[in-house]
């Protein structure tokens, strides 16, 4: 699926869970959306720069099942989580924020700062159970302010039931914040249909856009109740009013912008949107799952530390090896790009992988299981 549109220098690239491969069009998009206007437009550079941001939002919107106007560009996921946390309305008795032991640490670090406002983190046990909606029951109690599921968990590759979590949270009056960093671009998201309150993600991984082009989505019904602390002139309803004594929050997602947004990372990230949208995330997801099934069928099931359950897994896998250093050397010699977690070999598949990549991985790792 369009491997020729990415820089893959003779390697079996299995690192999309960490850094997605760079589209060959990336530099051209940065030039067109950021560098060239800066060189040629002078003071009028703002219109094409704003256009690059709008292009980013318009390309991301169908990938995450959302409207462009409900997306706010962010520098990274941590910043988005912090902005959301400190925007929530105070509600008497709702002091708990529920996440899981398997959440990516940066999410926990950001949420733990809520102690300054009287919040307390509560961690659910991790593992395969997180694919079961009933495992999230504690998150829907009347002392919970917000539940924070990851759509796909980075180490276990467990796919959480986001639609049901969002539905139960909404019924219980609990805010829901979805971390889609390990899902967007490879697993279908339907934010407008599922109706969580918030979502965050990054272009760094399966969106293949590089660092610095993260995003925040806010439900348009939730946005009016949010008052972010981290504001700037682009959080203003009229950024060009220039009255230092008057501030009104921008309607919708725009209130989470803060100061002057970055442009170059978002201009470049649009390159992959075109490729992903040409196929559609549903087709990419089906492709990735076929490749994972080929991998799971080729190796002993007990070799895997991550979820192998069809319908409850993302696009990554962790494989136990007897000697990681020896296995890593063999994988490197075979041109298999991977990384490690928990002493295991971690890989992921994406639209530029094919059966030949899986077969090369199997041949290289099988002697070390």
Image (spheres, rainbow, N blue to C red):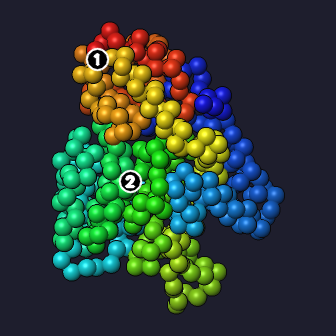
- Please say whether residue 339 is visible from this viewpoint: no
What residue sits right under mark 2 in the picture?
A: 179
**Is the C terminus in the top left, top right, bottom left or bottom right quadrant?**
top left
Tell me the residue that label 1 is attached to. Answer: 300
The spot of residue 198 in percent (x, y) is 41, 64
Quadrant assignment, res 54: bottom right
Picture residue at 29% right of the left edge, 37% below the top: 156
- Answer few, some or many: residues within 10 Å of disc 2's Cα (few below 14, many 20 plus, some between 14 and 19): many
Apparent side of residue 255 relative to residue 133 in the rendered image (left or right): right
Q: Sequence-wise, which precedes: disc 2 or disc 1? A: 2
Residue visible at 46% across and 51% down in the picture: 189
Q: Where is residue 74 in the image (x, y as percent from the top left)?
A: 50, 59
Q: Quadrant of the N terminus?
A: top right
The answer to whether any part of residue 221 appears in the image is: yes
Mark 2 vs mark 1: give the one in front.
Answer: 1
- The residue at the point 39 percent across, 22 percent down is 295
Alpha-carbon span between mark 2 and mark 1: 31 Å
Vertical order, 225 against 151 (above or below): below
Q: Residue 99 versus residue 294: which sits nearer the camera?
A: 294
Quadrant hosting residue 88: bottom left
The secondary structure type at the circle numbered 2 is: strand
Q: Residue 349 carries which label?
A: none
Residue 335 drawn above or below residue 245: above
Q: Residue at x 18, y 67 (%)?
A: 141
Q: Residues within 10 Å of mark 1 (few under 14, many from 20)?
A: few
Secondary structure at badge 1 equals: loop
């Amino acid at each position: 699926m369009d491997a020729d549109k990415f820089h893959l220098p003779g390697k079996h690239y299995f690192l999309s869970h960490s850094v997605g491969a760079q589209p060959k069009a990336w530099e051209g998009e940065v030039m067109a959306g950021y560098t060239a206007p800066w060189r040629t437009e002078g003071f009028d550079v703002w219109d094409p720069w704003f256009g690059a941001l709008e292009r980013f939002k318009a390309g991301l919107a169908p990938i995450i099942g959302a409207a462009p106007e409900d997306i706010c560009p962010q520098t990274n996921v941590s910043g988005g989580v912090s902005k959301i946390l400190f925007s929530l309305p105070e509600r008497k008795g709702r002091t708990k924020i529920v996440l899981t032991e398997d959440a990516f640490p940066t999410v926990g670090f950001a949420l733990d700062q809520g102690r300054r406002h009287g919040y307390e983190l509560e961690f659910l046990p991790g593992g395969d159970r997180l694919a079961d909606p009933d495992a999230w029951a504690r998150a829907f109690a009347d002392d919970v302010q917000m539940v924070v599921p990851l759509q796909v968990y980075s180490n276990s590759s467990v796919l959480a039931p986001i639609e049901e979590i969002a539905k139960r949270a909404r019924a219980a009056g609990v805010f829901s914040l979805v971390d889609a960093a390990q899902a967007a671009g490879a697993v279908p998201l339907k934010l407008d249909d599922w109706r969580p309150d918030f979502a965050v993600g990054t272009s760094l991984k399966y969106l293949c856009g590089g660092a610095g082009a993260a995003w925040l989505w806010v439900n348009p019904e939730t946005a009016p109740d949010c008052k972010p602390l981290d504001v700037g002139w682009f959080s203003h309803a009229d950024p060009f009013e220039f009255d230092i004594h008057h501030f009104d929050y921008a309607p919708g997602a725009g209130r989470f912008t803060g100061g002057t947004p970055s442009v170059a990372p978002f201009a470049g990230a649009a390159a992959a949107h075109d490729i992903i949208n040409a196929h559609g995330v549903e087709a990419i997801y089906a492709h990735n799952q076929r490749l994972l099934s080929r991998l799971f069928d080729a190796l002993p099931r007990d070799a895997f530390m991550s979820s192998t359950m069809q319908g409850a897994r993302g696009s990554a896998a962790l494989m136990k090896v007897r000697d990681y250093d020896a296995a890593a050397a063999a994988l490197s010699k075979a041109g298999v790009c991977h990384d490690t977690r928990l002493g295991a070999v971690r890989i992921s598949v994406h639209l530029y992988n094919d059966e030949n990549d899986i077969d090369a991985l199997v041949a290289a790792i099988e002697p070390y299981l």
